[in-house]
Structure formats: structure tokens, C-alpha cells
Image (cartoon, rainbow, N blue to C red):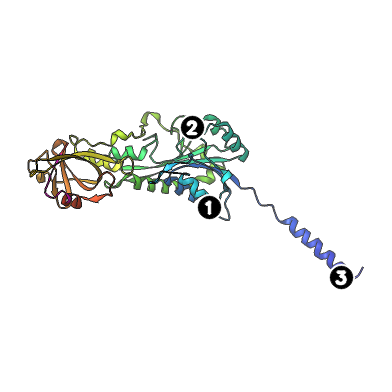
Amino acid sequence: MNSALMLRRFICVNASATLSSVAPSPRKKPLIFLGSPQVSVTVLEALFDASSAPNSSFEVAGIVTQPPARRDRGRKVLPSPVAQYALEKGLPSDLIFSPEKAGDEAFLSSLRDLQPELCVTAAYGNILPTKFLNIPLHGTVNIHPSLLPLYRGAAPVQRALQDGVQETGVSLAFTVRKLDAGAVIASESFQVDDQIKAPELLSLLFSEGSKLLIRELPSIFDGSAKSKAVPQDDSKATLAPKIAPDEAWLSFDQEAFILHNKVRAFAGWPGTRAKVLVLDDKSGQQNELELKIITTRICQSTEVLNGEQDYVTFKKGSLVFSCGGGTALEVLEVQLPGKKAIDATAFWNGLRGQKLKKL
């Protein structure tokens, strides 16, 4: 046998040996994410980032979100913020599901085909039936923006701020059929500033919740999270029901701290509103006006009222409303229907000497 042939055989044999010694790459665990509004995007972004790491054991195999809806000023039919983000990240559109209900059989069939090992929810907005919960191997976990079992329900951040809590947090819990009642895997607590509004707090809690999720994913996938998860004490549970639009009105016979907390809680949607009467002493005319109350603070001194309990006064950049219990509320920003929000000084100057009376 000539030397050239021997050399070729040697190279081929050794190349074959090298290839056979390399272990095949382990299959990444399929994870399905369920979310809809902008705050959910924070969590999805964290999952995409973590899944692209060299040592990641999972991949985002699909997205479940609310169906397209009319939003923004143009009232165009648009996909949810989560769907928009997933498309921008290059996820194929056939892996973005938007069923009317999470129990739709066609949707569940598609979900089973993906063989998810885990589902993660963050402000998805639909109730998950048992036949959904039975599909993922390691169950479904939810990021809930409260310290469970406190504030179970649709509006935990808003109701917590409305109650004036000084501490709240975010919980990572297994999803069960009973609303927000699953065992808690982990939680983080935070002090609440008395000026923070619901959209800011919601954003903060989902941002911290995404970190909590990424930290706990290994224990969820290896099954140890189920053994360490702490069952909730149902006797300590409080509810956070969905906010109704007619809750937006402010009643100034309540104390100022109650109204201030409501303004913070309902910021964004549905907002808080008050009716006032604009009085023109020269012409004798009076007009009813609806104000959206944007930003407030509790007045530290009621001396500014000067005995005029029925009238709105102005002091150092704020409209001062007398409230129940001898308290007063300072309104720093307002918005007229169809207009942009303005500060109290601009609004007061626009009255041109007319008086403002509470209704």
C-alpha cells in the first residue's frame, strides 16, 4: 500500500473518531409565554435574553396573548404589545396564538403539539382551564404583582395603592384553578413611596418579577420548586377586583388621604374625575366643568381654606380642595376633556378671575 493511501485512511479514521466523540447538543426545553399588555413585554424580553445565553436549557417556543383590539387614538385594530414585540424578535407568526378563550380546542391542540415543559403567565388576561393546566410537564407559573395571598385578582397594584399600603411586592406562584391561590415559589417585597402611581409601580414589580422568574427557572425545570413552594394561607387572602369606570369619580366629603390614594391607584386607567362649577361674578354665568385629576398631594395645612369650604382656592402652584374631616387636597395637574394635561397654575390663570366651586 503506498504512503499516500495510508495517509488518507489515517485522516478519515481520525476525523470519524473525533466526530463520534462529540456529544449531541441537548434539546432545549420548550417554554410557552402568556401575556398581553406592555408590562408583560418586560418579562418576555427577559425570557428571550435568558434563552439566548450559551448555557440556556430552554427556548421560547410560543406566545399566547389576547386577540388584536382597537387601541391608541386612531382606534386601529392592533396586535397586543406582547405580540408586536414577539414579531419584532423574529418569532414566526404561526407560533403566536391569540385565542378568544384559553380553553378553545383548536388552540389546545396546537399547544399540545409544541409539547411545552413549562408555561409562564404575566398579565395574560384570560382564565386558564384545567385542560390547559394539564398540558405543560412542569406546570404553569404566574408572576403576580402582590405579596400573595394579599390582593388576589385583576387589579392588585391599583387596590393596594387605593388602600394606602406602605409595603407591597411581587410573587412567583404555581397556577391552579382557584384564582391566584397556588403555592408561592418565591417573592420580593418593596416599600411604597406615597407619591408613586399605579403605572410606575406596576412596571417596577413586573421588572423585578422577571428577575425572580429567571432566577427560579432552574428549580422549576428540575422539579425542586414544587417541593419548596409554600402553600398560601387562604384565611389571610384579600381580593383585588377589577376596577369599574364609575369608580373614577372623587367625592370631596371623604378625607384627603383617601382621595390622594385613589388618584395614585387609578392613574392611567380609568383615571379620577371631579365636577366643579365655574362662576363669573361679572356676568352671573356659571358653567359645570369636568376635570380629570392627574396629580395630587395631601395638604399639610388647612389654613389656606380661609373658611371657604365650598370653593377651590389656589396656593403656590396647586388647586386646594377642602375635604372631609377638616383635611385638604392639593391638585397639581388637571386635564380638561379632549385636552392635554396642564399644571394647576396654567389652569388657574385660564380662569381669568372666575371662581371655582366644588360640586
Image mark count: 3
The residue range painted magenta reads 350-357
Quickly name the residue at label 1: 89
Residue occupying the far front of the picture: 283
Mark 1 or 2 closer to N-term?
1
Q: In the drawing, does residue 263 fall left or right of residue 110?
A: left
Residue 142 image offset from top left, x and y in percent? 47, 39
Quickly name the residue at label 2: 176
Residue 347 image offset from top left, x and y in percent? 19, 49
- Three-letter amino acid code at the position of disc 1: Lys
Q: Quadrant of the C terminus?
A: top left
Could you give the CA–CA distance between mark 3 and mark 1, rounded to whole angstroms?
Answer: 52 Å
Task: Give 31 or 344, whichever is nearer the viewer.
Answer: 344
Q: Is residue 9 above or below residue 262?
A: below
Could you give the CA–CA distance between mark 1 and mark 2, rounded to whole angstroms?
Answer: 30 Å
Residue drawn at (30%, 47%), measured in percent from left and top? 196
Q: Residues within 10 Å of mark 3 (few under 14, many from 20)?
A: few
Q: Secondary structure at mark 2?
A: loop
Could you give the CA–CA distance between mark 3 and mark 2, rounded to whole angstroms?
Answer: 69 Å
Residue occupying the far right of the picture: 1
- Three-letter amino acid code at the position of disc 2: Val
| Magenta residue check for 24 | no
Residue 36 image offset from top left, x and y in percent? 46, 42
> Can residue 212 be seen in the rendering of this structure?
no
Q: In the drawing, does residue 287 fall left or right of residue 180?
A: left
Task: Give 342 or 56, whichever is nearer the viewer.
Answer: 342
Q: Secondary structure at mark 1?
A: loop
Q: Which mark is residue 4?
A: 3
Residue 130 image offset from top left, x and y in percent? 53, 29
